[in-house]
Image (spheres, rainbow, N blue to C red):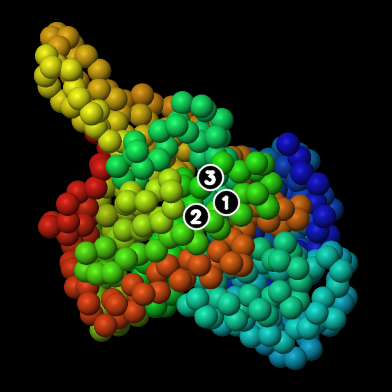
């Protein structure tokens, strides 16, 4: 469905940055090619003394892939935008230049802070509400703060500039299609809801294991690690969607209220040596590709003990979930890559005497990108029908036609903060992980090791891997 943009100008701060070139502009390109960006103007800004042509070339290059797969009108729209986009050199942390630029642009303007987090914070602190033209939207990247307190400080600054529903805290991990697939599955099917609780569910695992290693991102990653990079933001959001109560509507208010209620009830309980684990990869190989020891990578300080694999057990203290562990895990350089939520049901109370063979608990697997659904069930086996056997029902769910950052920008341009993380939630996500970060810093939980290309340290009990 074509959406109506309310934003007239997209101002990208950090025009020369990696995020802008690799993710933002290609995401924008699809929107433009599909005619979903209206007559949007795009303006780049940065501290480099670029000519307008240098910026236009950057935009043109980032648009190439979308252009190849577009029809004639899409190609023309992309060409026109790349030709007309303008560039402004400015120091966003200086008092004045950003506010003056905002005053010049056709509004409403969406300001995308594609800047290092501390620079974004300084830039926001320089602005005042009076300098915000009507309808201005502020788009903040992750990480949003570095602790509950710093996230609260940043929220205070932002909310003094524009209303909460004009602040987009980007979480590009879950596209709109994935969010709606989870909600559709849970709330449009009556058979699931009666068993979606502590009576019938033993545990829920949310796993994002990737085969990518550091890939030259030491400057960012060595200061973050798997807990901050993945669990603190993305995986807690997925957990909230899987655990939340049924919202009355899928509007941003109802949905974000329901997400927030889950996270407010969530915590990781001490002792952390029991409820959390961390590890770092050593040299190994993945699909024939040699991966060097993380600690010896350029830009890595081994003394920082940055984890490349983290696992935490979250408790949700409410009526529905009391006592059900939610295990969130994310790792780099893992041989068997997985991106899924796995719901393990309790075993049947009594298996009728006479059956033999496997009696395994049912598992529902929700794959995130590609979006899939798998249900593992026990059925009567082939040959001897008294012997139970395992089978899997499979479905592929519908994907989005936009790239993840296209969906982020679609929400920004149409003024829909549905996919954006609300301020209170951003603070709560830090509140949940902060005690663990402190305990890890103190060395309370050992940093274990695993070879790149394996599924983690040998002594870690394997999580619910899919059956063949
Ligand atoms: P980069 O370091 O690649 O780019 C930062 C940009 O900010 C550069 O264009 C830089 O310009 C500009 N900049 C820095 N200081 C100033 C200033 N005082 N005034 C104006 N411009 C300034 O960072 P990334 O693009 O990788 O990341 C940007 C944000 O996106 C970060 O918050 C990051 O966490 C987030 N992010 C990044 C992802 C990625 O894959 N890259 C993925 C998800 C989130 P110059 O070099 O000229 O100073």
User: Mark 3 near ligand 1 (CB under 8 Å)?
Assistant: no
Q: Please indicate whether residue 111 sits to the left or right of residue 189 in the image.
A: right
Q: Position of residue 89 (x, y in %)?
A: 73, 81
Res 230 visible: no
Label of residue 40 in the image: none
| Residue position for label 3 | 245
User: Where's the N terminus, which quadrant?
Assistant: top right
Instruction: Classify mark 2: helix, strand or loop.
Output: helix
Say whether disc 3 or disc 2 marks the residue closer to the N-terminus: 3
**Position of 444 relative to 332 (above/below):** below
| Residue position for label 1 | 258
Q: How many numbered markers are drawn? A: 3
**325 or 394, nearer to the observer:** 325
Q: Decide: marks 1, 3 in contact (CB < 8 A)?
A: yes
Q: Decide: marks 2, 1 in contact (CB < 8 A)?
A: yes
| Residue position for label 2 | 262
**199 or 193, nearer to the observer:** 199
């Amino acid at each position: 469905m074509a959406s109506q943009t309310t934003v007239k100008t997209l101002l990208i701060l950090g025009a020369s940055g990696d995020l802008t070139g690799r993710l933002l502009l290609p995401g924008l390109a699809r929107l433009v090619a599909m005619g979903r960006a209206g007559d949007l103007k795009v303006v780049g800004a940065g501290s480099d003394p670029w000519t307008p042509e240098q910026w236009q070339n950057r935009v043109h290059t980032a648009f190439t892939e979308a252009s190849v797969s577009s029809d004639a009108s899409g190609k023309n729209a992309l060409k026109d935008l790349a030709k007309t986009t303008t560039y402004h050199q400015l120091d966003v942390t200086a008092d004045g230049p950003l506010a003056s630029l905002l005053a010049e642009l056709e509004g409403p303007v969406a300001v995308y802070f594609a800047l290092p987090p501390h620079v974004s914070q300084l830039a926001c602190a320089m602005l005042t509400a009076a300098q915000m033209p009507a309808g201005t939207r502020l788009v903040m990247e992750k990480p949003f703060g570095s602790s509950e307190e710093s996230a609260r400080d940043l929220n205070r600054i932002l909310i003094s500039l524009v209303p909460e529903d004009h602040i987009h805290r980007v979480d590009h991990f879950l596209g709109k299609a994935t969010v709606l697939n989870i909600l559709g599955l849970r709330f449009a099917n009556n058979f699931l809801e009666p068993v979606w609780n502590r009576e019938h569910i033993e545990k829920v695992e949310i796993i994002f294991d990737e085969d990518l290693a550091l890939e030259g991102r030491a400057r960012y990653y060595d200061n973050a690690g798997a807990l901050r990079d993945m669990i603190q933001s993305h995986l807690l959001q997925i957990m909230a969607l899987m655990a939340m109560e049924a919202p009355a509507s899928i509007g941003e208010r109802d949905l974000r209220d329901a997400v927030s209620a889950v996270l407010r009830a969530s915590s990781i309980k001490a002792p952390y040596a029991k409820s959390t684990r961390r590890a770092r990869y050593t040299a190994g190989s993945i699909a024939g590709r040699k991966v060097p020891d993380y600690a010896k990578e350029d830009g890595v300080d081994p003394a920082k003990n940055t984890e490349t694999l983290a696992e935490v057990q979250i408790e949700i203290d409410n009526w529905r979930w009391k006592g059900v562990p939610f295990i969130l895990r994310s790792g780099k350089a893992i041989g068997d890559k997985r991106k899924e939520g796995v719901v393990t049901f309790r075993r049947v109370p009594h298996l009728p005497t006479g059956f033999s063979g496997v009696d395994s608990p049912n598992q529902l697997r929700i794959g995130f990108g590609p979006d899939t659904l798998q249900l593992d069930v026990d059925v009567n086996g082939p040959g001897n029908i008294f012997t139970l056997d395992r089978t899997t029902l499979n479905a592929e769910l519908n994907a989005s036609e936009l790239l993840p950052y296209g969906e982020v920008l679609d929400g920004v341009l149409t003024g829909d903060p549905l996919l954006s993380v609300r301020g209170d939630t951003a603070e709560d996500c830090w509140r949940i992980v902060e005690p663990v970060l402190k305990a890890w810093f103190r060395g309370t939980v050992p940093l274990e090791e695993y070879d790149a290309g394996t599924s983690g340290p040998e002594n870690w009990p394997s999580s619910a891997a899919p059956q063949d």
